[in-house]
Image (cartoon, helix red, strand yellow):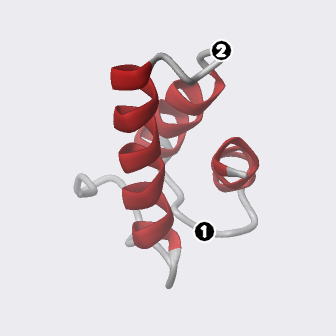
Amino acid sequence: MTDSASTPAEDGLVELLSDAKTIAAYGARTGKLCNSDLFNAIRGFETSSSKAWGTAEATNLLAAVN
């Protein structure tokens, strides 16, 4: 969900964010995440005013998921 100051997310980014949140929730429950990079990437993307593939926040989110 984006606020009024944000641009709509480009195709695929909503799904990527959803997947990232699912992975983070599973990792938190099972203790399988070795650091907080994924949580930081999610937070960074959610607070970014631009929801485009070319942004640093989208790149960080993709890297953290992979």
**Res. 62 image quadrant:** bottom right
Q: Which residue sits furthest bottom?
A: 11
Query: Could you say where residue 52 lies in the image, as x and y percent from the top left?
Result: 60, 68
At horizontal 50% and vertical 64% (from top left) the residue drawn is 16
State the count of labels: 2
Quadrant of the image for the N terminus? bottom left
Say whether residue 54 is left or right of residue 8: right
Across and down, in percent, residue 53 comes to: 68, 69
Gap in Å between the C-alphas at discs 1 and 2? 25 Å
Identify the residue under disc 2.
Answer: 35
Residue at horizontal 69%, vertical 41%?
A: 64
Horizontal relation, residue 46 to residue 2: left or right: right
Q: Nearer the viewer, residue 45 or 19?
A: 19
At horizontal 55% and vertical 23% (from top left) the residue drawn is 32
Q: Which residue is mark 1?
A: 52
Quadrant in the picture for residue 17: bottom left
Q: Quadrant of residue 18?
A: bottom left
Q: Residues within 10 Å of mark 1 (few under 14, many from 20)?
A: some
**Amino acid bearing label 1:** Ala
Whether residue 7 is situated above or below residue 55 in the rendered picture: below
Name the amino acid type tagged 2. Answer: Asn
Label 1 or label 2, whichever lies nearer to me, is: 2
Is residue 8 toward the left or the right of residue 61 in the image?
left
